[in-house]
Image: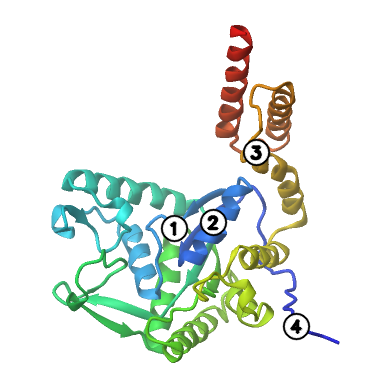
Amino acid sequence: MIFRSEIDLPKSDLVIEHNNRITTVGSCFAENISQNFIFYRFDVLGNPFGVLYNPASIFNSIKLLSDRKVFKKEDLFFDQGEWHSFYHHSDFSNHNADACLEKINEELVKTRKYFETTDVLIITYGTSYVYKHRERNIIVSNCHKIPAAQFDRLRLNMNETNDHIESTYKLLKEINNNIKIIFSVSPVRHWKNGAVDNQLSKSVLLMAVHEAIKEKGDCVYFPAYEILMDDLRDYRFYESDLVHPNKIAVEYIWEKFVNAHLTDSCKNVLMEIEPLAKAIFHRPRNIFSDNYKNFILNQLNLIERLRKKYYYINLKEEEKYFQKQLKEIQSYNNRY
């Protein structure tokens, strides 16, 4: 008997090597995926603007890069003691306008340069609902907790959503003609206005994405939404809010992604890196023991082997961490 509908994904035409440069843009689920890339030491830029949920906000962000936009003070607004940008996460906010502008503009230049050499971009849409600021008449990426009365909440229709996705694609190809794109729809439910609104929103995204990519050889769709909705159709795969996928679900979807989009050689690299990636989180009972000293030496040897085998992997932070641990042990032994 069959008790679940497992989704078997064939190997995608769009595959990733470990030395590829990856960028993720979109919802909080894109954040989860980028964390896995970071864990396995890919060269990755994760959500440079912060979390973006809808196609309009993602288009606006890419347009800032395409236009080489330089933010000025009039592009910001002041609220609750800080300067903010409607196009950026609150991490960019600052009590000083010049400091806020400096961080935003530096990040825009850095992000533009990274996009110019990105091999694979992963875009994850979360909702087709947008918030439009009444006074400025713009769709915002972040409301920054200012009063809801200043915004109109609107749902993009099919044509509007498709236009934003198509326009995003065109701008990306202008920035980097070699970029390849994996589109996805976030499996996170947006239940603020109920189940019907969520389904309408997701349906528009699904239709628009498939319409946009159907004749593009450099774009594919990864079914993260379908995997959680149908393959993992059980509340044991959700967090306590019954909306967000839990760690088990995220790891399962990641495994599906790996099998569909990573080459066999790339998967072999992941297997070699995983012991080192996990070793960073190891917490010994006694940091001054001989066992832990040997553990550290083993990690430093592993770093050296990986560096010789995969010249492009940056392991400076890992080496610095274990060298510091080793010096602490040596200093302790010299004292006692």
Q: Farthest right residue?
A: 1
- Sequence-earlier tag: 4 or 2: 4
- Say which element carries label 1: loop
Q: Residue at image x 51%, y 66%? A: 29
How far apart marks 4 and 2 lie (CA) works out to: 28 Å
Residue beneath label 1, please?
Answer: 47
Kind of residue at disc 4: Arg
Number of the label disc, if any, that sits on residue 282 = 3
How far apart marks 2 and 3 lie (CA) works out to: 22 Å
Residue beneath label 2, please?
Answer: 34
Q: Residue at image x 56%, y 56%? A: 119
How far apart marks 1 and 2 lie (CA) works out to: 8 Å
Label 1 CA crowd tier, 10 Å (few <14, some 14–19, many 20+)? many
Label 4 CA crowd tier, 10 Å (few <14, some 14–19, many 20+)? few
For discs 1 and 4, the disc positioned in front in the rendered view: 4
CB under 8 Å between discs 1 and 2: yes
Label 2 CA crowd tier, 10 Å (few <14, some 14–19, many 20+)? many
Displayed quadrant of residue 249: bottom right
- Sequence-earlier tag: 1 or 4: 4
- Sequence-earlier tag: 1 or 2: 2
Residue beneath label 4, please?
Answer: 4
Q: Residue at image x 74%, y 69%? A: 11
- Sequence-earlier tag: 3 or 1: 1
